[in-house]
Image: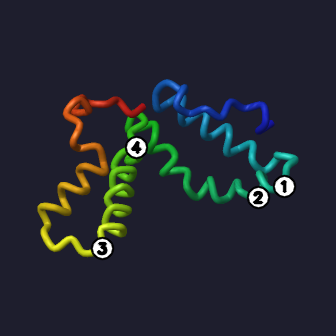
């Protein structure tokens, strides 16, 4: 049953075990007694290849890049008329935390 299946893919070691976990979860969707969960099963089956890619890339994510882009876009919206690109760039770096040299270490985003 789907509710008894552990749904924590980051704790699943390796692509083979990840594929097995995803396949067992996808197989459980049609028999789930909760109609909303049973109904979302086909959507997840359509996205199966993308979900399995998570395990092939060792859990890599573009989350940090999207977060930085969100800060830059917010800065662009509130900047309202920077005429000098250098000032705009510095403002984006300041907003995104680029002014803090102690944050230059490589992070492991897993």
Q: Earlier in the sequence, mark 3 or mark 1?
A: 1
Q: Earlier in the sequence, mark 3 or mark 2?
A: 2
Residue drawn at x 71%, y 44% is 27
Is mark 1 in CB contact (under 8 Å) with mark 2? Answer: yes
Is mark 4 in CB contact (under 8 Å) with mark 3? Answer: no
Q: Quadrant of residue 21?
A: top right
At label 2, counting other C-alpha atoms closer than 10 Å, the crowd grade (few under 14, some 14-19, many 20 or more) is few
At label 1, counting other C-alpha atoms closer than 10 Å, the crowd grade (few under 14, some 14-19, many 20 or more) is few
Which element carries disc 1, helix, strand or loop? helix
Numbered mark located on residue 35 in the image? 1
Residue drawn at x 61%, y 32% is 8
Q: Quadrant of the N terminus?
A: top right
Is mark 2 in CB contact (under 8 Å) with mark 4? Answer: no
Q: Nearer the viewer, residue 78 or 32?
A: 78
At label 4, counting other C-alpha atoms closer than 10 Å, the crowd grade (few under 14, some 14-19, many 20 or more) is few
| Residue bearing mark 3 | 80
Q: Nearer the viewer, residue 6 or 28?
A: 6
Q: Nearer the viewer, residue 48 or 92?
A: 92
| Residue bearing mark 2 | 39
Residue drawn at x 67%, y 37% is 24
Disc 4 vs disc 3: which is toward the camera?
3
Task: State how far apart marks 3 and 2 are (Cα).
Answer: 45 Å
| Residue bearing mark 4 | 61
Q: Is residue 15 shown left or right of residue 41?
A: left
Which element carries disc 4, helix, strand or loop? loop
Horizontal and vertical percent position of residue 91 = 23, 56
Numbered mark located on residue 45 in the image? none
């Amino acid at each position: 049953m789907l509710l008894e299946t552990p749904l924590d893919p980051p704790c699943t070691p390796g692509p083979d075990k990840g594929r097995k976990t995803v396949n067992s979860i996808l197989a459980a969707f049609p028999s789930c007694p909760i109609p909303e969960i049973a109904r979302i099963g086909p959507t997840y089956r359509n996205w199966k290849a993308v979900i399995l890619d998570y395990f092939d890339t060792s859990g890599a994510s573009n989350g940090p890049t999207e977060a930085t882009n969100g800060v830059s876009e917010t800065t662009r919206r509130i900047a309202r008329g920077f005429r000098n690109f250098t000032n705009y760039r510095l403002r984006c770096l300041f907003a995104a935390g680029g002014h803090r040299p102690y944050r230059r270490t490589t992070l492991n985003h897993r």
